[in-house]
Image (tube, rainbow, N blue to C red):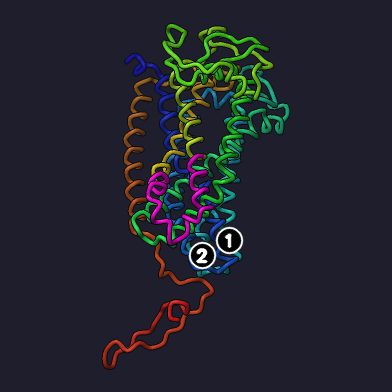
Amino acid sequence: MDFLSNTVVLSRMQFALTALFHMLWPTITTGVGIYLVIVEGLWLRTRNPDYYYHARFWSKLYVLNFGIGVATGIPMEFQFGTNWAPFSEAVGNFFGSVIGFEAAWAFMLEAAFLGIMLFGWERVNSTIHYVATIMVALGANLSTLWILTANSWMQSPAGGEIVNGKFIVRDYFQAIANPFMAKSVLHMFFATLETSLFLVGGISAWYILNNRHPAFFSKSLRIVLAAAIAVAPMQIYIGHLSGEQVYHYQPAKLAAMEAQWETTPAGQPADWSLVALPNDKAQKNNWEIIIPNALGYILEFKQNLTEPVVGLRDFKPEDRPHLVGLIYYSFRIMIGIGFFLAFLMLWSMLYWLLGKLNSKKITEQRWLLRTWIFAAPLGFIAIDSGWIVRCVGRQPWTLYNQIRTVDSASHVPASNVLVSLSGFAIVYAVLFVATLYFGSRIIRKGPNLELPIPGVETIRPAIDTSPGEFVPDERPVEAQQ
């Protein structure tokens, strides 16, 4: 229990808690925002009311997650001043401005148009409303751009140098376009999109399995599947490219990801451990299942690597990541989920080609629908696992190879951090339960298929309900025909 008196460890635990919890909600808003653009665009093009009702229904889940994302994102950023003040002071002239871009360019854009998207259906014309939906989705995804730019710069600092304990920017655009930036942004973009697609697909499958509006939700499942056909394999490929950049720029992290204790020289085949039990103290794996030469094919699609795979033993203990087991298995959980979602996409695509996903036959595919429901939360687990690999694997550095984590933490009593950590844990547990409760209420209630459709004229002929009493019929024209 020595960690209870260690300010740095407690501050890391608090940031891990707030970050891993917070990123669950922007994940949904970034991906579902794009989905809303798709279904509203289909409605404008076809005037099929089902697409309109899809836009109205899924926007409820969007705004719920937007609210929780805001509530949990602000405290996370405050920690750079409370728990990580020396780091903020050292890199604030670049890191602080990029975080500011996220607030000014992304969050403000999303928030400014959110009200029009939610409440403007009958108040603005359809073109303006669609532009508002696009701006909301754009703002949500700009957040991904700037947050990943800031974090990528921490992984591969560029565009300046440390002078007298502070990072001096020499080339601002080089700092933004650091070596990790492009692939990291793409990897996270496709991760949030894939997670949102399978969440929407899983909820749609639940409705179909329970025979609630099966024809209606078969449309959303097919939209999701059509997008997943491109997204799932692309995410695997970009994940591979991200692994390559770790191989070239962060060899210590790669060694921890693969539990490689001994160095494999360049030009020699590198083995890959499918599963292992890493032992940090003994600096070895207690047991492992090896696939000969496989690591070379994973990293460079060939047997012999052009660069060595440096083993953890070749790094000084103070210069390499610990918690190797956590990094190793988090990496494999992320990869396993990625391939499972790709398999589910292929299975579903086969059934689609066989004509088993039309509105009449889809209710018969019970095992496929159950698998979609099972897959709904897996993307969130994969994203959190990936961030564990990304950030724990970067240790012992906050700014890679330049500023150590131990030098980045604020000098505050450990007891203060323990109190705030406990408070966050309690509040976030309450928020999590509340989000699940209100989200489940939205799902149990289902879509309101009686909402008036903008641009559809309603007529109100008198309906004789009792002698002397007349009630106007307010249904849309299509419903009265």
10 Å crowding of disc 2: few (<14), some (14-19), many (20+): some
> Can you give x and y, in whole percent of width and height, for residue 249 in the image?
63, 21
From this view, report whether residue 131 is shown above or below residue 466. Answer: above
Q: Is 416 on the left or on the right of 175, as rendered?
A: left
Q: Secondary structure at mark 2?
A: loop
The quadrant holding residue 266 is top right
Residue 416, x across and y down, in percent = 36, 25
Magenta-span inclusion, residue 347: yes
* Residue at x-position 69% and y-position 27%: 169
Q: Nearer the viewer, residue 112 or 324?
A: 324
Looking at the image, which residue is at 52% across and 48% down?
Answer: 349
Residue at the extreme front: 354
Q: Point out the stretch of residues depicted in magenta.
A: 343-372
Q: Answer yes or no: is residue 361 visible.
A: yes
Q: Which residue is mark 2?
A: 120
Amino acid residing under circle 1: Gly
Residue 408, placed above or below residue 120: above
Vertical relation: 371 (above or below) 277: below
Residue drawn where x is 56% and y is 46% of the image = 229
Amino acid marked by disc 2: Gly
Q: Nearer the viewer, residue 46 or 156?
A: 46
Marker disc for residue 41: 1
Query: What label does residue 94 carry, if any?
Result: none
The answer to whether residue 19 of the structure is visible from this angle is no
